[in-house]
Image: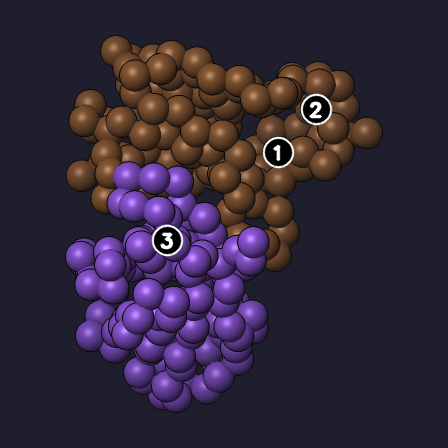
Chain colours: A purple, B brown
Amino acid sequence: DAGVIQSPRHEVTEMGQEVTLRCKPISGHNSLFWYRQTMMRGLELLIYFNNNVPIDDSGMPEDRFSAKMPNASFSTLKIQPSEPRDSAVYFCASSRDRAYEQYFGPGTRLTVT
Amino acid sequence: GENVEQHPSTLSVQEGDSAVIKCTYSDSASNYFPWYKQELGKGPQLIIDIRSNVGEKKDQRIAVTLNKTAKHFSLHITETQPEDSAVYFCAASKGNQFYFGTGTSLTVIP
């Protein structure tokens, strides 16, 4: 079985540009989570979806961040406009249900210059 | 909200020795405690987990113990091997959201 798929794996962009990160969860999983990992703050939950519906977006740092899940097999995390402090590794994870094991993708390393 | 503390932040052991990583949590309602291993350049990988109705769980060289009264849980790795070198994260959850510890960088010295 394919695990969680994320693209791109690396993204380098200039401040002010729009960035879109993509995630394909494991087939059959109905919960999807977006995390951000930095040295300073560790792993932080940004937002999670259950059955394609955003349940909790309290971790989204600012209005510059938005996430969508148009169907069960695809989600995007968009940053517009991007800033250098957004540089981090962004992970997507999925689970069979809210209370079950979460499986992480390989991450997208974002660098904003 | 939940607060998860993890210790130590770094740990070095000789190959073949045991390694123990400890976590405490604050919310007594937390009922699920996974452990993740993260290798350089990769996403966290679930290695073992325990639910609050169980005190101990073992999977080959890895074991996790949970003390609900004291609100702490630990990861035990026996007969460590160089490939066990990685960053390990604990987490606590009561269903919807995982709260992660700050990670332990484990180095197994051959």
**Percent coordinates x, y for residue A73 in the rendering:** 38, 67
Q: Can see residue A84? A: no
Q: Nearer the viewer, mark 1 or mark 3?
A: 3
**Precedes in sequence: disc 1 or disc 2:** 2
Residue pointed to by mark 2: B80
The quadrant in which residue A35 appears is bottom left
Vertical order, B61 against B103 (above or below): above
Q: In which quarter of the image is the N terminus of chain B?
A: top left
Q: Which of marks 1 and 2 is in front?
A: 2
Structural distance between the alpha carbons of marks 1 and 2: 10 Å
Left or right? Give the position of A15 relative to B99: right
Left or right? Give the position of A22 relative to B52: right
Residue at 51%, 64% in the rendered image: A5
Residue at 30%, 71% in the rendered image: A71
Q: In which quarter of the image is the C terminus of chain B?
A: top right
Chain holding disc 1 = B
Secondary structure of the residue carrying tag 3 is loop
Nearer to us in this view, B15 or A40:
B15
Residue at 70%, 24% in the rendered image: B80
Vertical order, A12 against B68 (above or below): below
Tell me the kind of residue under disc 3.
Answer: His
Asked if the residue at tag 2 contacts the one at tag 1, i.e. Cβ–Cβ closer than 8 Å, the answer is: yes
Residue pointed to by mark 1: B106
Query: Share a chain, discs 2 and 3?
Result: no
Residue at 60%, 29% in the rendered image: B11
| Residue A86: numbered disc | none
Q: Can see residue A17? A: yes
Residue pointed to by mark 3: A29
The quadrant in which residue B101 appears is top left
Chain holding disc 3 = A
Crowding at mark 3 (Cα within 10 Å: few <14, some 14-19, many 20+): many
Secondary structure of the residue carrying tag 2 is loop
